[in-house]
Image (tube, grey):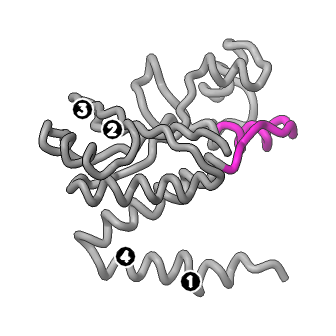
Amino acid sequence: MSIYQFRVLVRDPISDEDTDRLVERVPDDVAVETGPKAHAIGFDREGDDLLELILDALTQVVDAGLEPVAIEDELVTAADIAERTGRSRQSISMLIAGDRGPGGFPLPAAGHPRSALWRWEDVAQWMEQVDGRSYDIDGESRIIAAVNGALSMRALAKTRPRDTKRVFHDVVGRRLTRATTPR
């Protein structure tokens, strides 16, 4: 068994009453954070299946009356990228700026220009194409990306159900599946 730590970001501020309802429904300790930039519930879960643990936590969050919007991605700074890739900070800065390499470095996922944050999975995939080396992109990142995609579809379904059906049909269904099937 492994211990997984993840944070569920929720749409609205978490009140004391929300926290009480959440504590009633969650069998283990949770860390509740609410502030001007984010509202999150941190989970420490033990198990073999990260997806099952995340889905269970999402159910508990919804049952407590909160609206989940995402599982926090693994975000990295330019310094983190340099360390993980074995490059200097200057080399990474030049790749980001497009002064070195093919250009097209992934866009930041958060932060501001002086302290941007990137999704490690996006950067690792881009770096693999640039230098041909393999970087650690674990299955956990892909699971979180899939759950976040589903949470985005869930949010869209509440306001634009017809568009949701169309997106699901064309992206998951026949149109793109047929176009990407190997021949």
Disc number lying in front (1 or 3): 3
Compare marks 2 and 3 and give the one earlier in the sequence: 3
First to last magenta residue range: 123-139
CB contact under 8 Å: marks 2 and 1: no
Q: Residues within 10 Å of mark 4 (few under 14, many from 20)?
A: some
Q: Are marks 1 and 3 in contact (CB under 8 Å)?
A: no
Give the mark nearest the N terminus, 4 or 3. 3
Q: Earlier in the sequence, mark 1 or mark 3?
A: 3
Question: Marks 2 and 4, Cα distance to the nearest angstrom?
Answer: 26 Å
Nearer mark to the viewer, of 4 and 3: 3
Q: From the top left corner, tell me how far across and down residue 12 is, in percent.
A: 20, 45
The C terminus lies in which quarter of the figure? bottom right
Q: Determine the secondary structure under disc 4.
A: helix
Crowding at dot 2, Cα within 10 Å, few <14 / some 14-19 / many 20+, comes out as: many
Q: Residue 164's mark?
A: 4
> Given the image, on which type of amino acid does mark 3 rest?
Thr
Label 4–label 3 contact, CB within 8 A: no
The alpha-carbon separation of the residues under discs 1 and 3 comes to 38 Å
Amino acid type of disc 1? Gly
Q: CA distance from mark 2 to mark 1?
A: 33 Å
Q: Which mark identifies residue 40?
A: 2
Badge number at residue 34: 3
Q: CA distance from mark 2 to mark 3?
A: 6 Å
Between 33 and 94, the one lying in front of the other is 33
Task: Name the residue rendered at 46%, 55% in the picture.
Answer: 148
Q: Depth check: 11 or 127 in front?
A: 11
Instruction: Pick whichever of labels 1 and 4 is earlier in the sequence.
Output: 4
Q: Position of residue 89 (x, y in %)?
A: 67, 13
